[in-house]
Amino acid sequence: MRHLTKLVGTGLILMTVTACGGQETMAIQPASGGDSAAPSGSIATAPPSPSGKPQLQLPPGSTPVAAGKVDAAALPKGFPRQVYTANGGTIINLRAEEGGCQHALGQAIEQTAQHVVLDLSETKAQTGQMCTMDLRYPYISVALAAPLGDRTVVLKQSPPR
């Protein structure tokens, strides 16, 4: 009888594992870009929508900004520093950091002939809401008044809004 119980239990576990194996799973793929401070992977999902919300994949047609043209000294250590242009340089796509119930935000707060200052933040989580304690590294898009050209991108971070 004791062996029968173990055999039935093992059979149930194998059936459960086999049944779960047929469901869709998300795959981890290497992130594009070569910044060692950036996370090593991102979750592959459907192509990004044009809604302006944080997206897990780099929008198509994005071109990397040279590392010498990105000033990320104001960001915390380990914060992503991947910056790309799109749409003829009028859109900046950059890797951000968000977690739990908070979502990444980006805003161009200063645009001069020499540089563009981008402020990175997160939305505030609602009080009393249960949230996971995970970190995500989505791409966010910020529109510029004029193409980036040879200007430097200055990244800074402000508290959640």
Image (cartoon, rainbow, N blue to C red):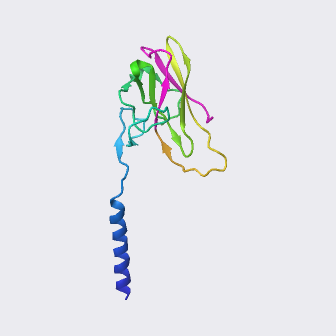
> What residue is rendered at 40% in x and 37% in y?
57
* Quadrant of the frame with the C terminus: top right
* Residue extending farthest front: 50
* Residue extending farthest bottom: 1
Q: Where is residue 122 in the image (x, y as percent from the top left)?
A: 57, 36
Q: In the image, is residue 140 part of the stretch drawn in magenta?
A: yes
Q: In this view, does 96 lie to the left or right of 109?
A: left
Residue 103 or 150: which is nearer the viewer? 103
Residue 124 or 134: which is nearer the viewer? 124
Position of 97 relative to 21 (above/below): above
Q: In the image, is residue 81 part of the stretch drawn in magenta?
A: no
Q: Where is residue 71 in the image (x, y as percent from the top left)?
A: 48, 23
Position of 156 relative to 4 (above/below): above
Q: Where is residue 93 in the image (x, y as percent from the top left)?
A: 44, 28
* Quadrant of the frame with the N terminus: bottom left
> What residue is rendered at 36% in x and 79% in y?
8
**Highlighted range, magenta:** 138-161
Q: Where is residue 160 in the image (x, y as percent from the top left)?
A: 61, 36
Residue 31 or 123: which is nearer the viewer? 123
* Residue extending farthest top: 113
